[in-house]
Image (spheres, rainbow, N blue to C red):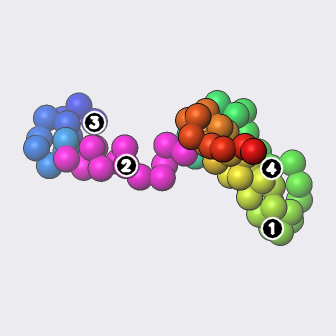
Amino acid sequence: MERKLLTERGRELYKIRGQTVEPVFGQIKDVRGFDRFMQRGIEACRGEWSLLCATHNLLKLWRSGKACWN
């Protein structure tokens, strides 16, 4: 990694990485403590993941202070 960051191309690619969706998965897994699905089956897991994503987005909105909750 060190060698890659020494090149101009490597630095540019690494900057783009911060703009991808990958950090969201890290936040959900690490900060929220999600390391495995509790349900069995693909449909149940999809529902669980949707709930996690919804709560993640609601928390972001609430923390931003821009949400109107009236």
Q: Secondary structure at mark 2?
A: loop
Asked if the stretch drawn in magenta spans residue 13, the answer is: yes
- Placement of 3 over or under 16, stated as above or below: above
Mark nearer the N terminus (3 vs 2)? 3
Q: CA distance from mark 4 to mark 2?
A: 26 Å
Query: Which residue occupies the extreme front position in the image?
Result: 70
Q: In front: 54, or 42?
A: 54
Q: Which residue is mark 1?
A: 42
Q: Residue at x 23, y 31 (%)?
A: 2
Residue 34 in the figure: left or right of residue 14: right
Q: Residue at x 80, y 49 (%)?
A: 37
Q: CA distance from mark 3 to mark 2?
A: 19 Å
Q: Residue at x 66, y 44 (%)?
A: 68
Look at label 3 and name its amino acid. Met
Q: Which residue is mark 3?
A: 1
Mark nearer the N terminus (4 vs 2)? 2
Mark nearer the N terminus (1 vs 2)? 2
Question: Pointer 3 and pointer 2: residues touching (CB < 8 Å)?
Answer: no
